């Protein structure tokens, strides 16, 4: 009986020693969840690196966008210049073509005027003369609608921009340097000379 009780006491003693030993080990053991001394510093460094990378990417994207915007603006400006230049060239070509046609029509006008000037007083009321007069008026009206106008000559001061002096003459009616006679009528098209007036100027 005593022996059995002693065995139980020894077992309890062994258990107690084991528990004390485990407690000592737990105290001396480093906590598993504890962070190392470098841990808290490394996390902010990683965040800063990531932020720098993102900032660099954003800066690169901004530069690319600005470059593309600048390229688009330049192309639009070039296209606008091209459009204006094309319109100007088109207008110039039209003006040149119109002038060429007008220059070819003017001799016809001259012949009409010569023909009407040669009609005698008796023939002026005739059907032929009246028909020629009507056609001449229609022709001159259409030319005026196209902004083709005759250059004033007789009685005007000689102007080399509009007049071509082919001879000098004497006149009691006009002063020196004034156009006394028109030998061939000149015309302008939209304020541009198509044909200069051939004139005689007073000496």
Image: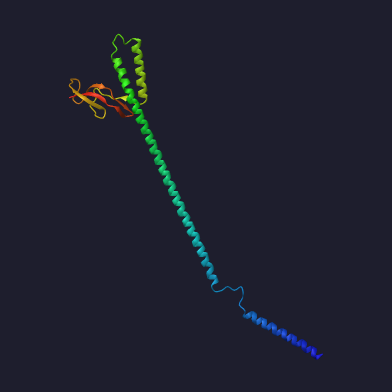
Residue sitting at x 31%, y 22%: 107
Left or right of residue 95, residue 30 in this image:
right
Residue 89 in the image: x percent, y percent?
37, 35
Residue at figure coordinates x 40%, y 43% from the top left: 78
Q: Determine whether, in the image, residue 63 is placed left or right of residue 103.
A: right
- Does 62 sit above or below residue 8? above
Instruction: Answer with the quarter of the image where residue 172 lies.
Output: top left
Location of residue 49 in the rendering, given as x and y in whole percent from the top left corner: 50, 64
At x 67% / y 81%, what residue is drawn? Answer: 22
Outermost residue, top direction?
122
Q: Position of residue 73 (x, y in %)?
A: 43, 46
Quadrant of the frame with the C terminus: top left
Looking at the image, residue 94 lies above or below residue 111: below
Q: What's the colour scheme?
A: rainbow
Specify whether 195 is left or right of 28: left
Counting the numbered discs, the total is 0
Q: Residue furthest right?
A: 1
Name the quadrant containing residue 149: top left
């Amino acid at each position: 009986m005593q022996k059995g009780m002693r065995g139980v006491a020894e077992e309890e003693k062994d258990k107690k020693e084991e528990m004390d030993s485990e407690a000592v080990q737990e105290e001396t053991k480093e906590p598993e969840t504890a962070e190392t001394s470098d841990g808290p510093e490394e996390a902010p460094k990683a965040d800063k690196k990531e932020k720098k990378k993102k900032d660099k990417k954003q800066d690169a994207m901004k530069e690319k966008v600005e470059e593309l915007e600048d390229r688009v603006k330049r192309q639009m400006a070039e296209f606008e210049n091209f459009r204006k230049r094309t319109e100007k060239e088109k207008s110039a070509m039209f003006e040149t073509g119109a002038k060429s046609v007008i220059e070819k029509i003017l001799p016809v006008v001259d012949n009409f005027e010569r023909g009407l000037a040669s009609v005698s007083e008796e023939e002026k009321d005739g059907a032929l003369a009246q028909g020629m007069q009507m056609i001449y008026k229609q022709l001159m009206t259409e030319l005026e609608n196209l902004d083709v106008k005759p250059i004033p000559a007789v009685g005007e001061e000689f102007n080399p921009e509009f007049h071509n002096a082919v001879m000098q003459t004497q006149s009691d009616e006009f002063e020196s340097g004034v156009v006394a006679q028109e030998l061939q009528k000149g015309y302008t098209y939209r304020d541009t000379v198509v044909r200069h007036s051939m004139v005689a100027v007073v000496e």
